[in-house]
Amino acid sequence: HLLCVNRTSGEITWHKQFDPKLPEHNYQGEGAYHGYAASTPLTDGKNLFVFFGKSGVFCFDLDGNQLWQASVGEGTSGWGSGCSPLLYGTMLIVNASVESGSLVALDKSTGKELWRSGGIGSSWNTPLAVKTDTRTELVVSVQNNLLGFSPDDGRQLWKADGVHRYVCPSVVAHDGIVYAIGGGHTSLAVRAGGDGDVTGSHTLWRQTKGSNVSSPIYHQGHLYWFSDGGGFLCCQKADSGETVFQERLEPRPGRIWSSPVLADGKLYVVSQNNGTYVVAAAPEFKLLSHNAFEDDTSRTNASPAVDDGQLIMRTDRFLYRIGK
């Protein structure tokens, strides 16, 4: 399903429904942890791009008219498909780890495949375009390694020792330094711009702290991330990985699978079943607020979107606009 909702009134402007390419992963057990709607759509202001896993990548105009559809593979996983597409110039980049073990570049105007690079194993995160002094690289975290690719032709430029298990959190970067976290208690920083195996030459630090699902945030020289099961916020120095604080949220949030967003000097993170936590984005822990819907106890895995001083939030039952 793809829905367009009026931002002011909440009324559904248009709704598109698709026949999925079957068989899909079973919506039970691990396959029901996040459902079929983990990928986030994106727009270049003219068209809308949506990734539906093995059913393909779709492009629509903003009136909901389909312009093209492209397949990036037909594989499935018991964990489902969860990567979001990335726009880079005239290309749409898709992490099709589940579908074909590949990073795929499509022409955003036609859906034509421009290049495909393999070796993308056990990776449920969205690639990031990282600028160095001489070039731009596409960086993605896969099982065991961080990988850097040329966006022009998909050629692998470098690799570095990474997270030694499947990887859900997306990487973040600042001034050409890539920061990655993952399960197995791992966080690390690698300077982009290398060639070949850069584990020894470009790894700046590696620490035995990390989170399994939620992505980190870089802000003013610090790295912030929320644990998926422990219910705490960790703040690390970006230059060394040294832990500044690790504090537990109260009331206990339970599982957190959404990624935090940074707005107005605050971190907003939504727990699955116990509301939203607002924490100061500062190297001193300060819980500012905790809010939960009294009449909606459904699960929340989606990160909030910030627009015009307001939050757009989605639970498994409702879409909300919150603010003045």
Image (tube, rainbow, N blue to C red):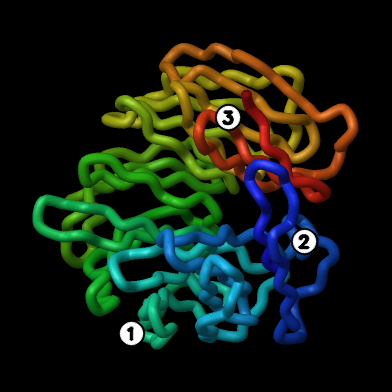
Percent x, y for residue 100? 52, 82
| Total marks placed | 3
- Nearer the N terminus, badge 1 or badge 2? 2
Residue assigned mark 3: 268
Residue 176 to residue 148: above or below: above
Nearest the viewer among 265 and 54 is 265
**Element at label 1:** strand
Q: Amino acid at mark 2?
A: Glu
Residue assigned mark 1: 114
Q: Amino acid at mark 3?
A: Tyr
- Nearer the N terminus, badge 2 or badge 3? 2
Residue assigned mark 2: 30
Can you tell which mark lies on residue 166? none
The answer to which image quadrant residue 268 occupies is: top right
Disc 1 versus disc 2: distance between alpha carbons? 33 Å
Residue depicted at 44% across the width and 36% down the height:
217
Instruction: Report whether residue 109 is seen.
Output: yes
Q: Amino acid at mark 1?
A: Leu
Percent x, y for residue 303? 61, 43
